[in-house]
Structures are given as structure tokens and as C-alpha cells.
Amino acid sequence: MKAVRLPVVMSVLSAGAACLLVLPLAGLLVQAPWTALPAQLAVPAVTSALRLSLICSFAALAVATLLGVPLAWVLARLDFPGRNVLRALCVLPMVLPPVVGGVALLLAFGRRGLVGAPVDQALGVALPFTTAGVVVAEAFVAMPFLVITVEAGLRGMDRRFEDVAATLGASRWVTFRRVTVPLVGPSLAAGMALSWARALGEFGATITFAGNLSGRTQTMPLAVYLALETQPEAAILLSLVLLAVSVAVLLVLRGRFGAAP
Amino acid sequence: MFAAASLTGAFGPVKAAFESAHPGTTVLFNFAGSQQLAGQIVNGAPADVFASASQAQVDVVADAGLVAGAARPFAGNRLQIAVEPGNPRGVRGLRDLARPDLKVVVAAPEVPAGQYATQAFARAGVDVRPVSQETDVSAVLSKVAIGEADAGVVYATDVLAAGVDVEGLDLPADVDVQATYPIATLRDAPNPAAAGAFVDFVLSEKGQAILRAHGFTQPA
């Protein structure tokens, strides 16, 4: 790669961007009471929140991938009336303020909700106040990221490889599995990383829809929020832990499944 | 004016009455859980007056050296059990809240309302397992009002403010917790004169009458 002389404007603006993104993280690292970290990690409520956050965010990622990839495929490859409307609706959770998303989830899946009411009448179960509810809330906010990214990847790939596979006798499922998915790999990896990160950090929809109870619905972001007023040092340490876990997983995801060349 | 969430209903008319008595002054409110407000003040948020739902939160601010003078109690509040109109689950008292088939919501232990609820449970000798601990008492009330929770422990004033959406059950006197609300002016108040005037108004007959009308009691 030959050396590029960056125009001054670009240098200044990109430096500004880096500062905006990095300085808060630097503040967190510098101001953290590091010596209290081991004690904080031993608190049962903390390990519980961390475990719950990891379980729920990965479960939400699984749901988002399982449902999101087919949806992305439909939006990218099929042409039908109302497709643009469907795409706009699928992206809506990304735009909605998270608490509004939580209220919407209650109206759909709560005990008085559109779908939730009949289910509660028939089976006596409802999603609010359950760990499953946390997963649903996180999947709701995270899935659009995956759908958007994968759809773009599917649109951008060279479809002739799929045609060649077909002429060579591969079934549609084999073509999908061995040609399409690898070709769209980088987009899928990026979409999954974004979705997972979004799910991990979700707060508003979770607390509104699933509530807050240690061990069942209190994820790390909720724990940080509650600790912030009464135990700021604990809040800073919790934030650090979340940051470290996020960075580790993101690095692994991008490393293993390949960043774009 | 940083005020506990439970004061939202009453302080609207207090603001109107104060502003008409002091033309040219505008009162801006920041309503939230008292512990959130205490945290914000300690972190440097510019506030003139702090009205808390418990002395503990004022102590947090006082320990940071940010209270001017002494905090004075200006209102009292009692607890009630909030249920849906018509009380469809047949809740009669705190003991019923321990029923495994009931979804009970309380405020988080960091919130004054949550602490008061825990005290009431201890006094009644009941082991209540809530399904959620909300970040402020208004959220507890909404969960009951929208039908997600069967019962919630809130202030009597919250039930009054919710009108027809919610029904309230009183607690027996030996179990009920009397919440005392202190009000204090802050050391770094941007407008100390107005702050003092507002506190005086709240403690005056007119201010107290408005609070009474919204269900607050005499401070203990």
C-alpha cells in the first residue's frame, strides 16, 4: 500500500472523531478504582448480572441470526408489492427510542397485549418479568442491525457464483450453504457483531418490558444504572467489566470469521 | 428544583401558586427517584432546592457539604398497596403479597419507596418476592396501572394522583411506614434568594394546603 498524504481537513476531522469516541473510554480507564475491582467481582449480584447479560445477549444473537438471515434474504432477493414498506418496518426498532420499544413490546406481548393476552388466558404465562422477556427485548432492538447488514451483503455479492453452482448440479440448500453464506460472510460477521453488541448494551426496552430483578432480569446495564447513584465506584467498575467483555468478544468475532480483506 | 418523583402531581400547583406570588420567577423541575437526584447534585448538577422522599438522600448531599443550612421536613406520606380497579386478584393486605400466584412490583432498594416497602414487609413479618424492582415509584405505579403487575407498593399520593386507573389499599397503622420528606436549599444554588423563597412557600400555609389536597400528611 503506498503512503497517502491526507488532506489537512481529513486529518483534523478524523482526529476529532477519534477523540470523541476514545476520550470517554480513556476517562473510564483512568478514573476507575482498580484496587477495588477484585472485591467487586466477587459480589454475587455482579456475577449474576454478568452471567445474565452474556446468556441473554448470545441468545438474542441466536434469535436474531436465525430469523434475520432469512428475512434479509427475502428482502434482498424476492420482489413483491410492499417490500419497501416491510423493509422500513423491519428497520423501525433501530430508530425507536428503546423505552418506546419496551412499551410497544408490552402492548404486543404483555399480559394485556395483542398476542400476550390470549396466551396468558390460555397458558397462564407471560413474557414480562422473565429472562425470556429480556431475550425478546434484546432481539427486538438488535435484529434490524443484522438484517440491514446481511441484506446489503446479499445485494452486493456476485450472483453468478450461485448460478454456476446450480449449473453444476447443487441443490438450492447446498448452494446457499456452501456458496452464498461464505460469500456474504464478512457482512454476516459484521451484522452479528453489531447485533450482539447492541443486545448486550440494551437497557430501556429491557427495564420497561422485562423489569429489574437480580438473577432473573437484571442485566449489567441495569445493574450499572442502579449502582450509579448510590455506589458510583461500583458503577464504574461494572462498566469496565462490561467494556472488557465486549472488546474481547468483538475481537474474537471479527478475527475468526474474517474482517473484509 | 430537584424533587422526588412522588411530588410530581402536587408541585405543579405549587409552582403555579409560587410563580403568581413572585412574578418574574420561573420554577424548573427535575423529577426523579430521590437517590438519582442526590447523585446528580453530588456530581455537580446546578440545583437550587432539593426535596427528597427520605432523609437518607439529603444526608448523602449533606455529607458532600452541599446543603445550605438545615433540611426541614415539609410533608409526610403513607404507603398503600396499589391494585387494579375492582381488585380482581382479591388482595386484602401485605400478607397476600406473599402469594406465589401474585406478581408484585416494588421500587428498588436504592429508592426511598423501596426502602419504606422493605420496612413495612419486615414489620408485618411477610416474605414478599417481587417480580421486579423498579427505578422509581412512578414506574411501580405504571406497571400496576397497565395490568402487568397484580400489586405494587407505592405512596398514598401516587394512588390519589392515578385516579381511576388504580385502587389503593391502606396498611394497618402498626405496619405502615410514615415517610418524611425533607426540603433543603443547596450551597451552590445559582439563585439562592429564590431558593429560600420557594422553601418558605412550601412550608407556608398555602403550600401546605396544596400538599394536603394531593394526599400528603403532616411531616412526622
Image (cartoon, coloured by chain):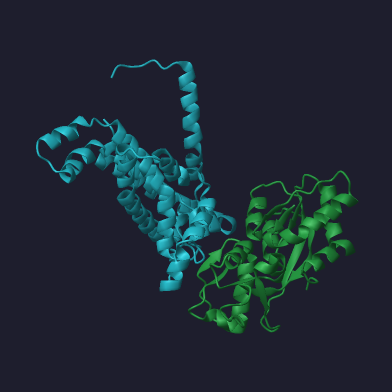
Chain colours: A cyan, B green
Residue A138 in the image, given as x and y percentages of width and height: 42, 53
Residue B141 in the image, given as x and y percentages of width and height: 62, 66
Residue at the spot 71% in from the left edge and 83% down from the top edge? B173
Evaluate whether residue A39 shows in this view: yes
Residue at the spot 68% in from the left edge and 55% down from the top edge? B31
Residue A90 in the image, given as x and y percentages of width and height: 42, 45
Which residue is more in the foreground, B49 or B117?
B117
Q: Is B219 displayed left or right of A223 in the figure? A: right
Q: Quadrant of residue B149?
A: bottom right
Which residue is more in the foreground, B131 or B181?
B131
Which residue is situated farthest in the front direction here?
A: A81
Residue B41 in the image, given as x and y percentages of width and height: 67, 51
Q: Is A148 displayed left or right of B217 in the figure? A: left
As drawn, B68 above or below A151: below
Q: Quadrant of residue A133?
A: bottom left
Q: Quadrant of residue A77?
A: top left
